[in-house]
Image (tube, rainbow, N blue to C red):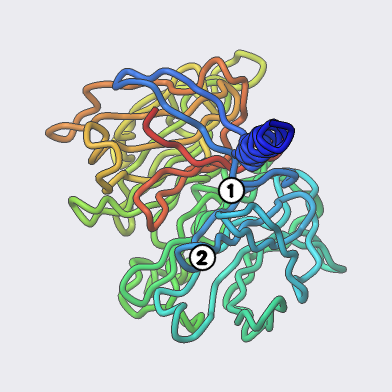
C-alpha cells in the first residue's frame, strides 16, 4: 500500500513537472482582434531598441538593425537568441539617423553578401553611406563602399533610408533636411530622392538624368520627403514607396523614372505649426499625385505586400507599420484603388517600426522598445 501510494505521488510529481515545463517554455503572446478574426502575437525576441531593418537570411535566422545603437544582430527566430555582429562601421544617430536598412543579396545562400545603409559624421559633415559586405561567422567583412550621399551637411536630419534590389539594381531612398526642403526639387544633390545604382556601385546608363547637365546621375526620381518604405508590387512589378509627411500628408507613391513627386511644392499635409507648406498646393502640373495619403499622419515605416497563404483573406493586401498612431496598417487594393483600410493592434500602444513576410508565410513586426513578434491566426 505504501509502495502504491509512493508511486502515485511520484507519477503526480512527474506530471506536474511536465506541465510546469510546458508553461515555462511557452512563448509570451498576446491576443488581438482583426476584421477577419482573432490574431495571436508571439514574441520572437526583445531588447532591440529600434528594429529598423528586419530580413531573413534563412528559414530560422533574421538579421536586424538597432538604428540608434548601431548594432547589427542575428536573431534565432525559434529560441529568440541574439548574436551581435562584429565589424559594423561607426554610425551617427543624430536626427533620424543610425544603422538603417539591411538587404541580403538575392544569392545570399551562395555568397553570404548583403547591402546596408547608415548615417555617419566626419570632418566633412553628416552624410549617408551604402556598403556591400560579406557575413563570415559573426563578423561583417566590408567589401566595398557603393554610395555616399552628396553634399555633406553640417547638421543631421531626415535620412530615409530603405534599400531594394531588383534585376541587378539597388534602389535607395533618402530624406531631406527640414531647413533645406527645396533640396528635394534640385537635381544637383541626393536629398529627398530615390536613387538607382548597379550592385557594384556604378551608375546605370539608362538612369533618367544621366545626360542632364548638373544632375547627379544616380537619381531615379525626386520630390520626396523622407522615404521609409520601399517594395515591389508582386502583382504589377511596380516600385512602391511611402514617405513621412509633416503634419498629415504621409504618402504612398508608385515610383516611375524621372518623375517629380512634389515635395515641398505640393502636399496634403501642413507644417508642424499648422501653417501651409509653401503655397498650400495639393496639385501642380508636372508633379505626381500620391496613390494614397494619410491625414492625420500615421508616421509610416516598413512596407510589404502579403503573398502567402497563412491568412487567406489578406492575400494581396499591403501592410505598413505606423509609429505615431501605433498600429499595423492594412490596405485592401482593388482595380488600382484602396477599397478598405484596417488599423490592427491599435490597443497595444506599440510604435510599429517594420513589417516583413517570413519564408514561412507569416508576418513579422518590429516595435520600438523593442520587440519582434510573429503574427499567427488566432
Residue 94, percent across and down? 80, 47
Residue 281, percent across and down? 41, 23
Position of 11 compared to 187: left or right?
right
Say whether marks 1 and 2 touch (CB < 8 Å).
Answer: no
Q: From this viewpoint, which residue is outermost toward the right?
A: 123
Visible residue check, residue 23 = no
Visible residue check, residue 374 = yes
Tell me which residue sits at (62%, 65%) in the image: 149
The answer to which of 96 and 105 lies nearer the viewer is: 105
Tell me which residue sits at (51%, 53%) in the image: 186
Q: How many marks?
A: 2
How packed mark 2 is, by other alpha carbons closer than 10 Å (few <14, some 14-19, many 20 or more), is many
Q: Which residue is mark 2?
A: 103
How packed mark 1 is, by other alpha carbons closer than 10 Å (few <14, some 14-19, many 20 or more), is many
Q: From this viewpoint, which residue is outermost toward the front?
A: 1
The answer to which of 55 and 290 lies nearer the viewer is: 55
Tell me which residue sits at (51%, 25%) in the image: 327
Above or below, 303 relative to 85: above
Residue 27, percent across and down? 60, 39
Tell me which residue sits at (49%, 84%) in the image: 200
Q: Secondary structure at mark 2?
A: strand
Position of 106 compared to 190: left or right?
left
Q: Which residue is mark 1?
A: 175
Of callouts 1 and 2, the N-terminal one: 2
Which of the two discs, 1 and 2, sits closer to the camera?
Answer: 2
Q: Quadrant of the C terminus?
A: top left
Q: Quadrant of residue 366?
A: top right
Above or below, 1 relative to 343: below
Residue 209 is marked as: none
Q: Quadrant of the N terminus?
A: top right
Residue 263, percent across and down? 48, 38
Q: CA distance from mark 1 to mark 2?
A: 19 Å
Amino acid at each position: 500500500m505504501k509502495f502504491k501510494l509512493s508511486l502515485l505521488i511520484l507519477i503526480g510529481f512527474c506530471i506536474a513537472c511536465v506541465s510546469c515545463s510546458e508553461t515555462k517554455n511557452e512563448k509570451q503572446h498576446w491576443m488581438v482582434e482583426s476584421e477577419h478574426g482573432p490574431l495571436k502575437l508571439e514574441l520572437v525576441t526583445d531588447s532591440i531598441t529600434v528594429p529598423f531593418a528586419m530580413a531573413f537570411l534563412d528559414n530560422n535566422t533574421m538579421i536586424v538593425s538597432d538604428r540608434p545603437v548601431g548594432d547589427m544582430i542575428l536573431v534565432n527566430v525559434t529560441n529568440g537568441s541574439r548574436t551581435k555582429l562584429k565589424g559594423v562601421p561607426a554610425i551617427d544617430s543624430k536626427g533620424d539617423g543610425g544603422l538603417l536598412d539591411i538587404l541580403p543579396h538575392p544569392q545570399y545562400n551562395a555568397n553570404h553578401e548583403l547591402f546596408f545603409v547608415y548615417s555617419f559624421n566626419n570632418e566633412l559633415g553628416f552624410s549617408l553611406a551604402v556598403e556591400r559586405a560579406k557575413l563570415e561567422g559573426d563578423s561583417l567583412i566590408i567589401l566595398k563602399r557603393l554610395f555616399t550621399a552628396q553634399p555633406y551637411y553640417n547638421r543631421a536630419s531626415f535620412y530615409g533610408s530603405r534599400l531594394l534590389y531588383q534585376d541587378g539594381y539597388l534602389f535607395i531612398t533618402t530624406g531631406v533636411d527640414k531647413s533645406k526642403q527645396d533640396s528635394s526639387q534640385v537635381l544637383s544633390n541626393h536629398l529627398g530622392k530615390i536613387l538607382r545604382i548597379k550592385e557594384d556601385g556604378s551608375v546605370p546608363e539608362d538612369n533618367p538624368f544621366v545626360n542632364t547637365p548638373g544632375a547627379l546621375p544616380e537619381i531615379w526620381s525626386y520630390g520626396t520627403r523622407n522615404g521609409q518604405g520601399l517594395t515591389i508590387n508582386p502583382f504589377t512589378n511596380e516600385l512602391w514607396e511611402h514617405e513621412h509627411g509633416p503634419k498629415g500628408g504621409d504618402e504612398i507613391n508608385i515610383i516611375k523614372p524621372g518623375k517629380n513627386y512634389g515635395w515641398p511644392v505640393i502636399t496634403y499635409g501642413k507644417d508642424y505649426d499648422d501653417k501651409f507648406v509653401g503655397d498650400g498646393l495639393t496639385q501642380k502640373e508636372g508633379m505626381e499625385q500620391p496613390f494614397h495619403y494619410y491625414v492625420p499622419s500615421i508616421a509610416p515605416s516598413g512596407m510589404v505586400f502579403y503573398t502567402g497563404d497563412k491568412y487567406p483573406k489578406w492575400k494581396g493586401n499591403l501592410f505598413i507599420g505606423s509609429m505615431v498612431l501605433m498600429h499595423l496598417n492594412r490596405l485592401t487594393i482593388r482595380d488600382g484603388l484602396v477599397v478598405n483600410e484596417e488599423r490592427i493592434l491599435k490597443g497595444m500602444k506599440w510604435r510599429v517600426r517594420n513589417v516583413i513576410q517570413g519564408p514561412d508565410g507569416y508576418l513579422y513586426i518590429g516595435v520600438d522598445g523593442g520587440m519582434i513578434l510573429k503574427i499567427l491566426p488566432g
